[in-house]
Image (spheres, grey):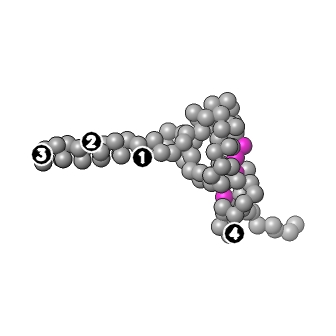
């Protein structure tokens, strides 16, 4: 009986570990419209954009960015080309000429 419990726990840990590895959506496997809809529906999302790259993307209008950061345009790869999205960045200072 204890061997069954150990085997069950080991199997559960393996399943959990493999599910967490795929938890971050990959923009390269989605169309631009799907990527933008995902961000809009969740207000913000951490998305993979390459084999070892990811970032947090947000809606254009919302309060997902902490001050002084604001949503700024960025482009990510999508299955149908480049896709315009927004991520939080600190705006460049306005320097008078």
- Answer whether residue 81 is visible to the viewer in this image: yes
Q: How far across and down, in percent of the image, does residue 18 sit?
A: 37, 41
Measured in 3D between alpha carbons, the distance from the residue under mark 1 to the one under mark 4, in whole angstroms, is: 32 Å
Quick one: which residue is furthest to the front in this view? 1
- Along the horizontal axis of the image, is 32 left or right of 1? right
Look at the numbered discs 4 and 2 and tell me whether their residues touch, using CB distance below 8 Å: no
Look at the numbered discs 3 and 2 and tell me whether their residues touch, using CB distance below 8 Å: no
Identify the secondary structure beneath mark 4: loop
Identify the secondary structure beneath mark 1: helix
Numbered badge on residue 11 = 2
Circle count: 4
- Camera-side mark, 1 or 4: 1
Q: Is residue 82 above or below residue 54?
A: above
Identify the secondary structure beneath mark 3: loop
Of 8 and 44, the residue lying toward us: 8
Residue that badge 1 annotates: 20
Measured in 3D between alpha carbons, the distance from the residue under mark 3 to the one under mark 1, in whole angstroms, is: 29 Å
| Label whose residue precedes the other's in the sequence (4 or 2) | 2
């Amino acid at each position: 009986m204890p061997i069954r419990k150990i085997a069950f726990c080991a199997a559960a840990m393996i399943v959990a570990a493999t599910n967490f590895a795929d938890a971050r959506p990959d923009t390269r496997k989605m169309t631009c419209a799907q990527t933008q809809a995902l961000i809009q529906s969740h207000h913000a999302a951490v998305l993979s954009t390459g084999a070892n790259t990811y970032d947090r993307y947000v809606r254009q209008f919302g309060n997902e960015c902490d001050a002084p950061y604001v949503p700024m345009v960025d482009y990510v790869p999508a299955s149908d080309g480049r896709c315009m999205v927004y991520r939080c960045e600190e705006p460049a200072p306005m320097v008078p000429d």
